[in-house]
Image: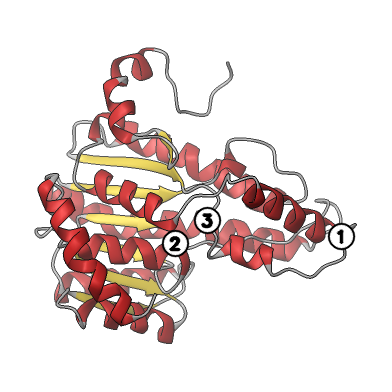
Amino acid sequence: MNGIEYSKLLARDRAVMVDRGLDLSDQVAVVTGGGRGIGREIAFALADAGASVAVAARSADQVQTTADMITCVGGRAMAVSVDVTDETGVREAVAMVQDRLGAVTLLVNNAGVGGPIGPTWEVSATEWWRTIEVNLRGVLLWVHAVLPDMLAHRRGRIVNIASNAGAYRWPNLSGYSVSKTAVIKLTENLALELRNKGITVFAVHPGLVRIGLTEYALNNESSSDSPAGKVAAWVRQEIAAGRDLPPERVAKLVVELASGLGDVLTGRYIDAQNELTELIARADQIHEDDLYTLRIR
């Protein structure tokens, strides 16, 4: 999406969101991995709803582009170049956001890597562990950095972008799968620890979206009998069967969660294919039966 296309969508989307009560004009959001892919779409959607948005990622040019596309149509945004695994850098980034935009009320932990592909005993242990570092430690560091201020104000929401790979088995992608499982379980623990403190936490499965890591898999030219080739073939098969989702779907879900609409579902693993209003209607049953969590059934 270019700046012209984005500006055309802004008035329409903002009007719809405000009409539904999803006005985030009093909120400050941080979106990690916001320079491209799903993160960029989420940043756009939050800005459309009126939030001030800090776009964070390692690629300075990409986050600046995202921030510029928001500000050029009247939104409020800033770019932050930081490695999510750099503890000092993350804390400094949060301080910069607080100084320029105000207290962070929403953290979207979207940054992530796919990790090495292949049997666990054959892939590089260093690359495998780097996947854990980015996908799990990165989440933890940002949570550590924003929570003290959220607790002081008794206000905040955290959305951790997870994956179906964390809820089910994904052979040949064990680093990614294990990291996302840990993110889901971290979400559950945080939600209980923060109960009655004004802060809610969610894990969100964005579905198969034709940008970001999915785009990388689609463009993979590995041989069909290799692990990477088999992953790419599966992705193409799912898309051909119509089981992918438009990026706007997950962005809309994040905006809804940011608005407080889903606070009753704090700690839950929510699939972007689900309608949030339908889950909210079933909230009593979800809590009673401990649904949308990782547990032995």
In the current view of this chain or complex, which residue is farthest to the right?
Answer: 225
Q: Quickly name the residue at label 2.
A: 38
CA distance separating discs 2 and 1: 27 Å
Q: Position of residue 47 (x, y in %)?
A: 22, 65
Disc ID at residue 72: none
Amino acid on which the number 2 mark rests in the picture = Ile
SS category of the residue bearing label 3: loop
CA distance separating discs 1 and 3: 22 Å
Residue 19 visible (yes or no): yes
Disc ID at residue 224: 1
Q: Position of residue 280 (x, y in %)?
A: 28, 27
Amino acid on which the number 1 mark rests in the picture = Ser
* Whether residue 70 is situated above or below residue 296 in the rendered picture: below
Q: Quickly name the residue at label 3.
A: 209
Name the residue rendered at 26%, 51% in the picture.
255
SS category of the residue bearing label 2: helix
Amino acid on which the number 3 mark rests in the picture = Val
Going from the N terminus, do you reach mark 2 or mark 1 first? 2
Quadrant occupied by the N terminus: bottom left
Quadrant in which residue 166 is drawn: top right
Q: Position of residue 182 (x, y in %)?
A: 54, 43
Name the residue rendered at 54%, 65% in the picture.
212
- C-beta proximity under 8 Å, tags 3 and 2: yes
SS category of the residue bearing label 1: loop
Residue 96 visible (yes or no): no
> Comparing marks 2 and 1, which lies closer to the viewer?
1
Going from the N terminus, do you reach mark 1 or mark 3 first? 3
